[in-house]
Image: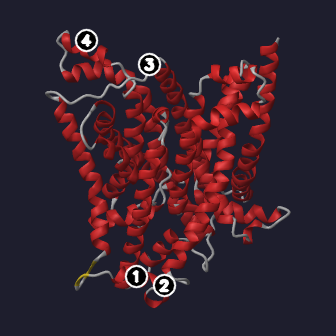
Amino acid sequence: MARAAGGVAGLAGATALAVLPIGFLAVFFAWPVVAILRLGLADGEVATTLFEAQTWQLARFTVAQAAASTVVAVVAGLPVAYLLARVRLRGVGAVRTFILVPFVLPTVVVGLAFRALWPEGGVFTIVLANAFFNVAVVARTVGGLWAHLDRRAEDAARSLGASPWQAFRTVTLPAIAPAVASSAAVAFLFCATSFGVVLMLGGSRYRTLETEIYLRTVNLLDLSGAAALSLVQLGAVLAALLIGAAARRRKETAARLRAAADTARRPEGREWWVVAAGFAVLGLLVTPIIALLLRSVSTRDGWSLEGYRALSGVGEYGALNVTGWDAAMNSLRTASDATLLAMIVGVLAAVALVALRRSPERGARAAGEAMDTALMLPLGVSAVTVGFGYLLTLGELPWDLRTSPLLVPFAQALVIVPLVIRIVLPVLRSVDQRLRQAAATLGASPARVWREIDLPLALRSLAAAAAFGYVVALGEFGATSFLARPDAPTLPVAINALVSRPGELNSQMAYAACALLMLVTALVAAVIDRLRAPQAQVGEF
């Protein structure tokens, strides 16, 4: 009876905690997106757009480049995952930190970095740039599970005459398959909704659903066409989310079945080839970064720091309305506000999801799965659709957010919340229930149990989630490019403005600003890796 009462109380508490995240999602995501879709559907042209050949050409190109980028990311990420999970060598800890840097770099920075290597852009460059982002997703997700696998099964296969490849294919690969599928689904989602990279490297020649939605909404005011494309994109996103959720459940089950043991050792024999492949991937990842840094200090007349010095001005021909340093300060303030909002919503959502998952009620567990999937949707819906929806809907609130400085932070927080949840949720789920039950038995209230048991164990991951969210907000470009006022641009928006205007000084300023953003994200990535709790390594990122 006491356990049943506790279950009811826990379910009631989870429901109360879920109110704010669900309300946030409803007001700042569902309402704006539905408003855009209704506006587009109102003129009856959506069906026409859906049956146009160009629509499905865009969809095919979007899916094809995302699939190609995902394959490249998985193939490149597996040797690095092996490095992180199985290899004990000096420098592997630095690899774990470095691999996170590409993932948190702003899209405009990566776009310009690859443009420094391939000025003409093109499909090949788009695929490589999107894969560059997502190698970290594969390496850290797969490596987290791989590190928990018992080596003895693989060693037994080798002792029975299996080659290293046969042992990997028949023993290891089936065991890590859930993590591979989960990371591939996440990578596909990010590649399919890539905006800044395609905008920078594709230009007017290559467009995805995301950039076409931007073009039709901002330049052509074709809301029905944008709505139709949003529907197609949403279908692809939902499919990726469902596949990722199923793979994530299998991965969590696999992780629970194995004790976390140190399986790393010095490589032997042919294992050195895998190690060499992993370090080769790292070398390829650092190439665009070095190219960008070199480009930021090179001019027609030789090496120069003119681009960095020019950040105190507005650029050549008045390219900016504010100085580069003012744009940087705007980015810092906006990212701070967005991170605070996202942490409040994301942590409450994670706590509610854990409570729903632990509930004995099947309906509560199903509700938790549905809520988890719904909270991931902002990652896969066009940021432009959401941004334009804000301008249509948020004026109807008791306070008009459209003119508020919080408009951009709310849009950025919407992107950060799913990432916060994915970092914090595995840690909260790993908290031993016996500790919580013992505290409750001694008379501690649910709030005190969380404060005394869960919070200390999750504190490092909470700090990591905040740092992670901060750098993502710092480099957010999609919604911010649409919502930021001309007199208050963030640094990524200013970089895009500089790139789109003629003048060598503008180009130098853009590369210099990218180098500064990259430095900040690299430092924060190092902080994130130091803050991550060991049990978080089985998480998503």
Of the two numbered discs 3 and 1 on the same chain, state the one appearing first in sequence.
Answer: 3
The residue pinned by badge 4 equals 156
Residue at the extreme bottom:
317
Residue found at the far top of this picture: 160
Amino acid on which disc 2 is placed? Ala
The mark found on residue 506 in the picture is 1
Residue 54: image x %, image y %?
A: 49, 56
- Mark 1 lies on a secondary structure that is helix
Give the residue type at disc 3.
Answer: Arg
Q: Nearer the viewer, mark 4 or mark 2?
A: 4
Q: Tell me the element at label 4.
A: helix
**Residues at marks 1 and 2, CA–CA distance in whole angstroms:** 7 Å
Q: Are marks 4 and 2 in contact (CB under 8 Å)?
A: no
Q: Is residue 105 visible?
A: no
- Distance from label 4 to label 2 (Cα)? 65 Å
Q: Which of the two marks, 3 or 1, is nearer to us in this view?
A: 3
Residue nearest the observer in this picture, 241 or 17: 17
| Image quadrant occupied by the N terminus | top right
The residue under label 3 is 258
Q: Which residue is mark 2?
A: 319
Task: Using a 10 Å C-alpha cutoff, classify the residue at mark 3 as few (fewer than 14 neighbours), some (14 to 19) or many (20 or more).
Answer: few
Sequence-first tag of 3 and 2: 3
Going 56% across and 67% down the picture, which residue do you hit?
A: 332
Q: Residue at x 59, y 55 (%)?
A: 49
- Label 1 amino acid? Asn
